[in-house]
Amino acid sequence: MAGPSSSRCAQRLLLHLHPRPQLARQVLSGCQIRNFHKSAPRLAKNTSAPQALNTRYRAAMALAAGFASVAIGIYFAPKVSFDSTTTVMGNFKPSIETLPRKPEPEFLDTRDASLPRYRLSEVKEHDGNSERPWVIHGDKVYDITEWVSAHPGGSVILRAAGGSIEPYWNIFAIHKNQYVYDILQQYLIGFVHPADLKDGKPPQDAIEDPFADDPIRHPDLITKTAKPRNAETPDEAMSAQFLTPNELFYVRNHMWVPRIAEDEADNHLLSIELLDGSVKEYTLSDLKSKFPKHQVTAVLQCSGNRRKHMSDGSGRATNGLQWTAGAISNASWEGVLLADVLRDAGFENDQGMSGTSEVKHVQFNGMEAYGASIPIRKAVDPQGDVLLAYGMNGKPLPRDHGYPLRAIVPGHVAARSHEPMAA
């Protein structure tokens, strides 16, 4: 079969090498010569030996010249790199940065259209200091103003105002019940704006961690729970000295640790409410200046100390924190006698001691929304040593241990030594 014609060869080359016509012409020259070379044997059959030899010689020379021209053409042709965006071919490659990005899918808001949408910044303005505190649960916004006074945990709910209530409900799992959701539903006022939602919920970085402001603890404490922090005193600290160092005193918290600024501590207010409804208030500065200072050395021990040993020994898990032996510590406490303060507030201590008073207990309430009570006789007994303490081992109370004021009730489980005191 005869080889392809020069015109067909040229068409194919021009089609593939259009950006480089010079190279196409050079390669076309070689194509024509090779086509002539393939025809040389057929010509030789119809010629004499000298003529055939001469024809073959000329064909070989022409073929060599063709290859040489192709080589020269390729050498001097513009160089092409498929790795660089600065070459000729690179100019035809679009940059990845200039390609259009796939748009983020829009949130399809199918929620109740009759209720407004609120930006997170607007919700934040309705914090615990606002006249109308709001909270977020899921993608819904609630005005809890009317609920605060009825809340079983008291005003601690205001800690969540201005943001999501979910981190707090993760602490108190009792809230994760349908009847609680039903109560909250009564205060629904709207939804979080779609612009502030990610996958249908406020982003995690928009939810405040209530424990973010907790104090830094000593690394030798043996942590049982991180949030809230509960930690044991290490064994060596319990036996190394009579008084446990403040930083190694075991830590028991039900919630995050309240913060009172140092320059506000002297104005921290204690309220004493008697059975008849009368109220007497004292600042910390009043307590220090008006009543004699007393010092009492007392051990505090959690009622669940060695609970883990009970679990291991019985083969049945006990409820509560699995303390080993480290939920116990000893300290020297400084403060004023609760009996002195009650007498000054108008209580008849003698009736309390004799059992003739209608008052049977003293109820402590604090900033942790945690309460505890002790018998009135223990509270007013001159030998009872119940303190309203503001010092620990010669220093102001640490934040983890009731700063700036706490109760110390020697001889009772540590749960009765309430901290920190708010009323």
Image (cartoon, rainbow, N blue to C red):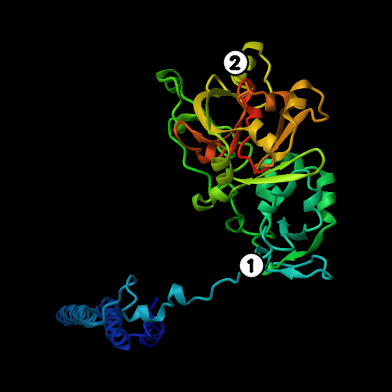
Q: Position of residue 159 (x, y in %)?
A: 66, 52
User: Badge 2, how many Cα within 10 Å: few under 14, some, many 20+?
Assistant: some
Left or right: 256 in relation to 355: left
Residue 262 shows up from this direction: yes
Q: Position of residue 166 (x, y in %)?
A: 68, 50
Left or right: 62 in relation to 367: left
Tell me the number on the disc at residue 309: 2
Circle 1 — which element?
A: helix
Q: Nearer the viewer, residue 19 or 179?
A: 179
Residue 194 drawn above or below residue 207: below
Residue 384 drawn above or below residue 30: above
Residue 404 shows up from this direction: no
Locate the N terminus by quadrant: bottom left
Residue depicted at x 62% and y 58%: 203
Q: Nearer the viewer, residue 62 or 66?
A: 66
Q: Position of residue 404 (x, y in %)?
A: 55, 42
Q: Which image quadrant for residue 124?
A: bottom right
Locate the C terminus by quadrant: top right
Q: Amino acid at mark 1?
A: Ser
Q: Which image quadrant for residue 407?
A: top right
Query: Spatial distance from mark 2 to mark 1, Cα to Cα?
Result: 50 Å
State the residue position of label 1.
121
So how many labels did they put on this image? Answer: 2
Residue 89 drawn above or below residue 102: below
Residue depicted at x 75% and y 39%: 174
Residue 23 drawn above or below residue 324: below
Q: Amino acid at mark 2?
A: His
Considering only order in the chain, which callout, 1 or 2, is on the residue closer to the N terminus? Answer: 1
Residue depicted at x 69% and y 53%: 158
Q: Position of residue 353 (x, y in %)?
A: 74, 23
